[in-house]
Amino acid sequence: MTQSADPHGIDPHGAAPSPRATPAAGLGHTARQVLLSSRPLSWINTAFPFAAAYVVTTGRVDALLLVGTLFFLIPYNLLMYGINDVFDYESDLRNPRKGGVEGAMLEKGLHRTVLVSGVATAAPVLLAMIVLAGADPGSWLVLAISLFAVVAYSAPGLRFKERPVLDSVTSSVHFVSPAVYGLAVAGALVTPDLVALLTAFFFWGIASHAFGAVQDVEPDRQGGISSIATAFGAARTVCVAIDFWALAGLLMLVTDWPGPLAALLVIPYILAAWPYRSVSDADSERANNGWKRFLRLNFFTGFLVTMLLILWVVLR
């Protein structure tokens, strides 16, 4: 696959903007790069778990809900993906997927800007959220683990993303921890049903990361980056993803009604990955078509999960 110009107007090779650009154009370009680095397409994937967990547990809309949702919507993602894009720059240059909604190809001159923007936007919202949540050591611990996972995934010296299996586990923590934090600050009672639900979500996250890693087997190997897919091989990793989605569905079957209905939601993901269960490493780039279907499925699944939550509240 050849690497073409990005539809967002970003040079996939990270070239500097034209020196003839006006200050206004330069500022707009920088803002677009920072925004793209936060993966707007994925904002809802971290904000919704927090908001849903908090509202379902407390039954109220308050300041903590609004501030927490804002934090997990934008600053959290800018921190997580911004750090990733900055420290994955060299390998991203070899990756034809980068330079669009699947990852910004940041100019080197903007690396510091993206990192500073992440901290500057996160710090005040995070502080407000902690103040509103009050003195709850349990929620502080969950939040600390969540933020550590955000940094550890990509930052030099830790680079959990280069530790096969731990990469998928850490990625799943990125999406499950906002829900756990929402439950913690809401004072949710820990029950077997809740543990099963969160474990199912965790398994879904592992499966999703593993499948996403398949399409990058060759670019990662060329860049000297290890991942669950480079360690297991493309076909085996697809099978791992399918297995974990299936386990997530089975766990939902043991939750209280209407939880078992959510077990059906893993089927479209399994079907999206199924055609690639025998894909070779050399041809693994082909799995990108399945990944694009995965991204679209997330919006459809989110809608159905919302409907199930509403049904759960009504039945309760």
Image (cartoon, rainbow, N blue to C red):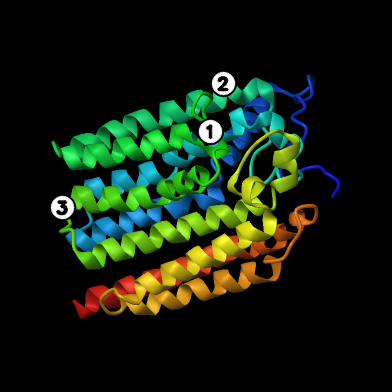
Q: Is residue 249 visible?
A: yes
Q: Position of residue 140 (x, y in %)?
A: 23, 37
Q: Closer to the N terminus: mark 1 or mark 3?
A: 1
Q: Residues within 10 Å of mark 2 (few under 14, many from 20)?
A: few
Q: Closer to the N terminus: mark 2 or mark 1?
A: 2
Separation of marks 2 and 3 at Cα, in angstroms: 38 Å
Mark 1 lies on residue: 154
Mark 3 lies on residue: 187
Query: Depth check: 88 or 123 in front?
Result: 88
Q: Is residue 9 visible?
A: no
**Mark 2 or mark 3, which is nearer to you?**
3
Q: Which mark is residue 112?
A: 2
Residue under the point 59% across and 60% down: 295
Q: Residues within 10 Å of mark 1 (few under 14, many from 20)?
A: many
Q: Give residue 262's quadrant in the image.
A: bottom left
Q: Position of residue 26 (x, y in %)?
A: 67, 26
Separation of marks 1 and 3 at Cα, in angstroms: 32 Å
**Mark 1 or mark 3, which is nearer to you?**
1
**Mark 2 or mark 1, which is nearer to you?**
1
**In the rendered view, would you say 152 is above or below 275?**
above
Q: Are marks 2 and 1 in contact (CB under 8 Å)?
A: no
**In the rendered view, would you say 203 is above or below 309?**
above
Residue under the point 56% across and 21% down: 112
Q: Give residue 222's quadrant in the image.
A: top right
Dividing the image into 4 quarters, which one contains the C terminus? Answer: bottom left
